[in-house]
Image: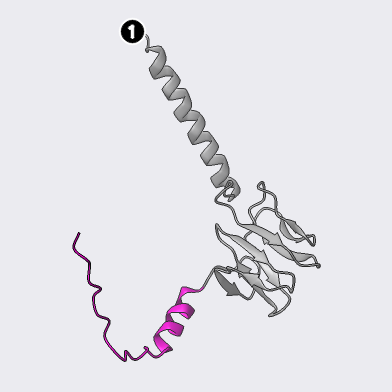
């Protein structure tokens, strides 16, 4: 008994979706809008890194295209790499980087969650001067 046309079309669509996803996974590339994007508002080019192209520069007053998945951005101000993740990171006109997921020493390094946990544990908890009172809800 032959398959109905709707079932055949569904199988073809599922096959195409899986093929597309596997090609993205093999390239270690997140498609837009999940990829890391850099907006360079400064007057100097910046060094960026991605797993497919290595280190390259992004010109001044430009942004990375949707086809690139930028993973790290170099900061000349602190000499470290900003791990981007699936975010949009902006560089202001002074070279400051906004919305950095974490700072690493080398392009391609992952964020070290142990360092973040240690920093949180070493920070003293703020003292509460007065307990917050629940707000009264007016009756209608």
Q: Quadrant of the C terminus?
A: bottom left
Q: Nearer the viewer, residue 80 or 107?
A: 80
Secondary structure under tag 1 reads loop
In the picture shown, does residue 60 fall above or below 9? below
- In this rendering, position of residue 70 left or right of residue 102: right
Q: Nearer the viewer, residue 90 or 15?
A: 90
Q: Which residue appears farthest toward the front when viewing the image?
A: 140
At 59% from the left edge and 74% from the top edge, which residue is drawn?
103
Disc 1 designates what residue?
Answer: 1
At 62% from the left edge and 60% from the top edge, which residue is drawn?
71
In percent of width and height, residue 70 lies at 65, 57
Q: Is residue 54 shown to the viewer in this render?
A: yes
In the picture shown, does residue 62 fall above or below 111? above
- Residue 135 on the magenta span: yes
* Highlighted range, magenta: 112-140
Q: Which residue appears farthest toward the left when viewing the image?
A: 139
- Residue 108 on the magenta span: no
Q: Which residue appears farthest toward the top when viewing the image?
A: 1
- In this rendering, position of residue 129 left or right of residue 69: left
In percent of width and height, residue 73 lies at 67, 66
Quadrant in the picture for residue 81: bottom right
């Amino acid at each position: 008994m032959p398959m109905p046309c709707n079932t055949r079309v569904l199988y073809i669509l599922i096959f195409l979706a899986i093929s597309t996803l596997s090609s993205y996974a093999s390239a270690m590339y997140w498609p837009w809008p999940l990829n890391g994007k850099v907006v360079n508002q400064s007057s100097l080019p910046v060094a960026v890194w991605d797993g497919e192209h290595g280190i390259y520069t992004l010109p001044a007053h430009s942004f990375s295209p949707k086809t690139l998945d930028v993973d790290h951005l170099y900061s000349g101000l602190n000499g470290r790499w900003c791990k981007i993740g699936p975010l949009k990171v902006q560089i202001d006109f002074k070279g400051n980087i906004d919305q950095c997921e974490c700072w690493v020493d080398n392009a391609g390094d992952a964020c070290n969650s142990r360092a973040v946990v240690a920093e949180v544990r070493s920070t003293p908890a703020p003292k509460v001067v007065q307990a917050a009172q629940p707000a009264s809800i007016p009756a209608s």
